[in-house]
Amino acid sequence: MTPEQFLEFARVLPEPLLLVSGEGELLATNQPVADMLGLRRQELRGRMLFELVTESSNDIVKYLQACSSSRAMVIGSLTLRMNDGQTLICRSQGAVIQPWSPESSALILLRLENRVLASSNFVLLNEKIDELAKEVQRRKQAEEALWKANQELEIRVEERTTALQETLNELQLTQTQLIQAEKMSSLGQMVAGIAHEINNPVSFIYGNLHHAHKYTQDLLKLVEVYQQAFPNTLPEIQQQVEEIDLDFLIQDITKLFQSMQVGAERIQEIVKSLRNFSRLDEAELKQVNIHEGIDSTLMILEHRLQARHEYPEIKVIKKYSQLPNVTCYPGQLNQVFMNILANAIDALEASALNSQYSEVNTQKTESQKLINNNPQIQIKTELLDEKWIAVRIADNGLGINEQVHSKLFDPFFTTKTVGKGTGLGLYISYQIIVEKHNGQLNCFSVPGKGAEFVIKIPIQSASSHFS
């Protein structure tokens, strides 16, 4: 796409859009960008992105390199210097539109988003997508009419129609992915905020429990000294001792403090898991303990694992191996664990309902009854060699038939009822594992015998994106 083609395409869109080179040179912008900065569009062309933002050149270079080498949209944050001297924090979404190679620089499309205006802009984007869909339909009808007049023209028209349809599908998929990314980002911020708010009072309570217990023991020792020094107490004192059952109080108060300490420690563990899970919006590569991410996801889903109404308790069997820390995008891996584990729970719940409906069937085998009454999810991690690890998540539910299995990782494909699934969970998980981490994601299933998802990622995942 040339700068002129970019301007032709961007002119109808209300979002601030920039076309930059892989080195950060502004090749073209649309009017919303100029309005946002308080400059004329002509003043922006030829300038460098580093001149317009407060972030360091090194951070900008890393971000542009990530955009250049990723097939997916890369989300970041840019703080713009406006013409009046003020700054404006924008969320940026970058995508490469010309493949990068050593011989040619990448062309990167950056979409800026002021969070205050995000909602109204997103509505306008939906309207433009609807307009594009209608335009595709009109062109298709016109091209079919031309086909009747000329066979050669029909071929060209069909190719053009297919290209436009693919563009529409990509735009619709991008739209849905943006919604999903915003949901996950909001969830991460909410969970992090809750963890922070809970941690402060719990830390205060936990820190003072020791002192409160010590002070109480000191007071009880003082009472014991009084009892030894004055064995014959006044009647009113003896009456109060009997009313409060002093002997029982002395024995029980230690148990109370122990119980409070166990409760406070449990809350601290939950807060730690919430903080681990709230890595959803982290965009940087980090070395992390994979087991912490799995455990935090299980904690978030714990309420769905417990027995309730017609669903029995789902047992989680963890077989963790000794693993090194893995360089990865921890928030995105947590999202994969969430998608696969939630699907496993859905499968086991469906198996439980199916079991209830078929109780009248006397041909049901004892092994089938045992499985339905004992739903399990097994999580196994292993070190494959010095470069690779594997995470295996298996359930003993209904399994997946061959027809569904062939479409498992397709976008918008789902077997769930309307409102329960978007058909993007496994598609996004596949992108995260394969494209972002250079790994492998496979599913193995036999109908009636459950399903197993196998995640394989290198210990130095995704580092090649920045090499």
Image: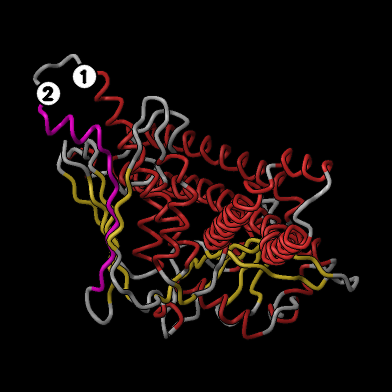
Which label number is shown at residue 370? none
Q: Which residue is mark 1?
A: 358
* Distance from the alpha carbon under mark 1 to that under mark 2: 8 Å
Q: Residues within 10 Å of mark 1 (few under 14, many from 20)?
A: few
- In the rendered structure, the answer to whether residue 465 lies left or right of residue 5 reads left
Q: Would residue 78 be counted in the magenta stretch?
A: no
From the viewer's perspective, is residue 222 above or below residue 190? below
- In the rendered structure, the answer to whether residue 147 lies left or right of residue 165 reads left
From the viewer's perspective, is residue 383 above or below residue 352? below
- Nearer to us in this view, 447 or 117: 447
- In the rendered structure, the answer to whether residue 312 lies left or right of residue 304 reads left
| Camera sees residue 23 | yes
Provide residue 347's location: percent of width, then percent of height: 31, 37
Q: Which residues are magenta?
A: 365-383
Q: Would residue 368 be counted in the magenta stretch?
A: yes
Dots 1, 2 in contact, CB < 8 A: yes
Provide residue 228's location: percent of width, then percent of height: 72, 61
Residue at position x 64%, y 79% in the image = 25
Q: Which residue is mark 2?
A: 364
Provide residue 378's location: percent of width, then percent of height: 27, 52
